[in-house]
């Protein structure tokens, strides 16, 4: 099995555990109560990505993963012109750096937050594969351009805007660990 296939299997398994551990106390407060039209992953990207990257680094210790923050965009036609429209306006996912740029990718355990159901529950794909579907993950913001090789860098950045982010991550990690046993 390819490395991408192995990762996809792991992320699929972990997505199931994460979903079982999600609750209002692990979601971003601005995204609660959960709107009826949104999936259960809505507002869960930060703690889920932090828990997931920890697991993936244990399972795939030689793979270079980094947390990324930014937006997810979809190619569209607006007023007769090509445009990139945000389908997730503020998001966190895992970037997977590879030896060749064409192999660099995205690992996203909460991609189903995208408007209009554009993406499946989780994504493990190269940027080119996503671009061929008209989707672009755009890391931006923060002092590192939205890419954080160390988890603490992202948490520190987000703590300025969201004081309880560490608590949400800890709650999700505890529930996840119980389910994983």
Image: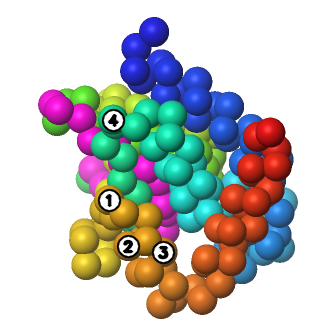
Q: In the figure, is residue 91 to the left or right of 24? A: left
Q: CA distance from mark 1 to mark 3?
A: 12 Å
Q: CA distance from mark 4 to mark 2?
A: 20 Å
Residue 33: x and y in percent read 83, 73
- Distance of label 4 from label 1 (alpha carbons): 14 Å
Part of the protein shown in magenta = 82-100
Mark 4 and mark 3 lie on one chain; the one further toward the N terminus is 4
Looking at the rendered structure, the secondary structure element under dot 3 is helix
Tell me the CA gap for discs 2 and 3.
6 Å
Pointer 2 residue: 153
In space, the residues marked 2 and 1 are separated at their CA atoms by: 8 Å
* Element class at badge 4: loop
Tell me, yes or no, if residue 125 can be seen here: yes
- Residue at 25% from the left image edge and 78% from the top image edge: 143
Q: Kindly report which numbered mark, 4 or 1, lies closer to the viewer in this rendering.
A: 4
Q: Is residue 80 left or right of residue 119?
A: left
Identify the image quadrant of residue 17: top right
- Pick the front one: 97 or 110: 97
Proximity of marks 2 and 1: CB atoms separated by less than 8 Å: yes
Q: Is residue 87 visible?
A: no
Residue wearing tag 4: 62
Pointer 2: residues within 10 angstroms few (<14), some, or many (20+)?
A: some
- Pointer 3 residue: 155
Q: How many marks?
A: 4
Please tell me which of labels 4 and 1 falls first in the chain. 4
Distance between mark 4 and mark 3 Cα atoms? 23 Å
Q: Is residue 114 magenta?
A: no
Q: Which residue is mark 1?
A: 149
């Amino acid at each position: 099995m390819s490395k991408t296939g192995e990762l996809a299997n792991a992320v699929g398994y972990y997505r199931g555990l994460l979903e079982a551990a999600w609750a209002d106390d692990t979601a971003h407060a601005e995204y609660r109560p959960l709107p009826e039209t949104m999936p259960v992953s809505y507002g869960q990207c930060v703690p889920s990505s932090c828990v997931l990257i920890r697991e993936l680094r244990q399972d795939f210790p030689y793979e270079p993963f980094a947390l990324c923050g930014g937006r997810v965009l979809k190619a569209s036609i607006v007023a007769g012109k090509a445009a990139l429209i945000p389908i997730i306006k503020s998001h966190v996912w895992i970037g997977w750096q590879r030896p060749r740029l064409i192999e660099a990718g995205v690992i996203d355990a909460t991609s189903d937050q995208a408007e209009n159901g554009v993406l499946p529950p989780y994504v493990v794909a190269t940027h080119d594969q996503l671009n061929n579907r008209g989707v672009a993950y755009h890391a931006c913001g923060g002092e590192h351009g939205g890419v954080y090789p160390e988890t603490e860098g992202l948490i520190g950045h987000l703590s300025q805007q969201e004081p309880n982010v560490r608590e949400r991550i800890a709650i999700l990690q505890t529930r996840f660990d119980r389910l994983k046993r």
